[in-house]
Amino acid sequence: MSETATLVVCALLIIVGVIGIVVPVLPGLLLVLLAVLVWAISTGGGIAWTVFAVAAAVYATGVAAQFLLPGRRLKAQGVGMGTLMLAVLGGIVGFFVIPVVGAFAGFVLAIFLVELSRSRSREHAWTRTKAALRAIVHSMGIELMTAFAITVILVVGVVVTKV
């Protein structure tokens, strides 16, 4: 594959990956890392594989941060892992019941209903639902920043290998 074609494939993988982060249907961050792997395989050499190794380390750090940081806030708010698992299930059901917005609506509704059944208070349930939504947005932000960092690493690698 030509160098230009490789870069186009990498750019498309990154774009689809970022869309996959915002619309969680595809493994977005993994696709961004895959773009660097495709480039490293195509380019070859020590610099390319070093760039991939750095990108993989950033990926691993981002994935760890994506789960650890928001999870800590959720625990502080009293939202358990069981609630989130049921919310994911609600999101999956919502995805098939209501096209386009169903996943989000099902996710939010499931959190609210689980927390309402636990606390018997709408105020507490809504407070915990908002905390869960903030954590999800925070997690998505971490994932987007990680994707941006990996993209910058790829661009630097492309520039360095051209010089």
Image (cartoon, helix red, strand yellow):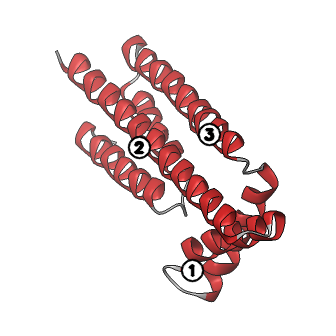
Is tag 3's residue or tag 2's residue first in the polypeptide sequence?
A: 3
Residue situated in front as seen by the camera: 154 or 95: 95
Where is 89 relative to 18, above or below?
below
Q: Amino acid at mark 3?
A: Arg
Is tag 3's residue or tag 1's residue first in the polypeptide sequence?
A: 3
Q: Residue furthest left?
A: 163
Seen at 26% across and 23% down, the residue is 156
Q: Amino acid at mark 1?
A: Gly
Give the residue at mark 3.
Answer: 73
Question: Which x, y percent locates residue 26?
Answer: 54, 59
Q: Are there few (<14), some (14-19), or many (20+) residues within 10 Å of tag 3?
A: some
Q: Nearer the viewer, mark 3 or mark 1?
A: 3
Q: Quadrant of the C terminus?
A: top left
In three-dimensional space, the C-alpha distance between marks 3 and 1, rounded to whole angstroms, equals 26 Å
Mark 2 element type: helix
Q: Amino acid at mark 2?
A: Leu
Where is 132 relative to 118, above or below?
above
Is tag 2's residue or tag 1's residue first in the polypeptide sequence?
A: 1
Seen at 44% across and 15% down, the residue is 50
Q: Quadrant of residue 22?
A: bottom left
